[in-house]
Image (tube, rainbow, N blue to C red):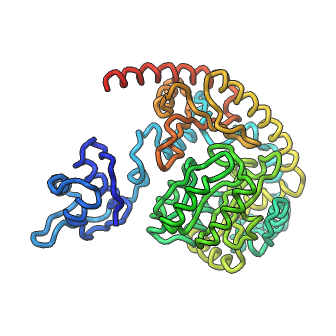
Amino acid sequence: MMERESNQGASGTRVGTVMDSLRERIASRSLMPGARVPSIRAMTEALGVSKSTVVEAYDRLVAEGVIVARRGSGFFVSGHAPPFALADLGPRLDREVDPLWLTRQSLEAGSKVLKPGCGWVPAAWLPEDGVRRALRAVARDPQSVLADYACPAGLPALRQQLAWRLSQHGVDAPPEQIVLTDGGTHALDLVCRFLLEPGDTVLIDDPCYFNFQALLRAHRARIVSVPYTPCGPDLAAFERALIEHRPRLYVTNSAIHNPTGATLAPAVAHRLLKLAGEHDLLIVEDDIFADLEDEPAPRLAAFDGLARVVSIGSFSKTLSAAVRCGYVAARGEWIEPLIDLKLATTFGNGQLAASVVHRMLVDGTYRRHLESMRAKLADAMGETVRRLGYAGLDIWTRPRGGIFVWARLPDSLDAADVARHALADNVVFAPGNVFSASQSAAGFLRFNVSQCNRPKVYEALQRAMEASAVTGGRERKRA
């Protein structure tokens, strides 16, 4: 059954609301070609609009070829399903502030473009010389496999090393319960393939890492967001969502939350796991920023013992984005079916990448690099927080580590508008609603402190805020 909608559609009319609702169901494959469209009466009741409004909307969709009318039978989705496009799902955003556009802009930008809104550290901060040394060492080692597939679960020596590293965070995961992947996104995709069916409900934080939303939509999941606080999810809202929506999964970061930089409090973690047990909820804990912590935060996987928590991570943010290597740690009986899915979809993971990562872990290169990187990030965090304060932004919470600061703009400025103005200065900011499924973070920006060490970032921010204040004032006068 469709949920009642009160907002008007993209056209600003009730007819547009009906049309947008139906288009979204078709785009998400909830209604496939040939499927019967809800009756006029059902749509009227679901959306709280008049019968004549639905009739006009259906007539327009027939004229556009989206649906067809069959005398005496009703309306049906016409033709073949269009190619699946993530941009057609979720809230309609301007392309300049769309999450996937933001990622593309950051990845494709030239050297003249500054990226304080991106989600990774500058390449100069990563151990490129160490990667080169590791590559040469792996190439010289006669035991290295350079031309064959990896074993199904991934390089045994690296899984052994990961088991030890996870134990340092209190997570008991022997090598037999770890599967290697090609990065963190691949790890999450594999888990979603294993645990979700189309239409399943998934809880996410609001705000959360925007690619969680994109990937879940790609799996045809129904997304429900829960407000996030400086200590973790709002537990009252979390419990209400469990009762009302009966979700299958909750996807989150426990340590160094993206985008807020917050850290899960132990009391919140214990209550969250108790609720998960009461409502048969599974949890995916993305621990990709674990190695950027100054002090270890609580891990749901440590408290839970991998009973209903799956831990995923990678080295993309700390070692190299080009050496794609991640992992899944899960309960023992899930490992074989996860490996089967991995073989069916990728036929393995990069053996060379896993060998390079293992080499850098065991020869001390990675440990020394992290010590230097944490010191740089601590300095950058202090400087970024100070400069943003001077600019009039309010820091939501002071992070205990990592690369992100979540800050509120002054004077009720709209972050998307500020980001659009900044593009003219070749500066890419990350507006808050990119991370918010409820679109309730319009006044926030996420800042990557490692990318904020140029005066031009703050100069562009100031100009963009001034320009946004002017355009915002004009719009208020017209209203």
154 relative to 429, above or below? below
Among all residues in the image, which is located at the extreme right? 363
- Residue 156, by quadrant, is bottom right
- Residue 267, by quadrant, is bottom right
264 relative to 433, above or below? below
Q: Residue at x 72, y 37 (%)?
A: 398
Q: Residue at x 79, y 36 (%)?
A: 378
Q: Position of residue 187 (x, y in %)?
A: 63, 63
Of 450 and 243, nearer the camera is: 243
Quadrant of the image containing the C terminus = top left
303 relative to 383, above or below? below
467 relative to 300, above or below? above
Q: Residue at x 66, y 21 (%)?
A: 390
Q: Is residue 354 left or right of residue 346?
A: right
Q: Position of residue 151 (x, y in %)?
A: 72, 73
Of 311 and 347, nearer the camera is: 311
Of 245 and 29, nearer the camera is: 245
Q: Position of residue 466 (x, y in %)?
A: 50, 19
Among all residues in the image, which is located at the extreme front? 236
Residue 388 visible to an observer of this rendering: yes
Q: Position of residue 52 (x, y in %)?
A: 14, 54
Total labels: the figure holds 0
Q: Residue at x 71, y 49 (%)?
A: 263
Residue 148 visible to an observer of this rendering: no
Quadrant of the image containing the N terminus = bottom left
Of 268 and 366, nearer the camera is: 268
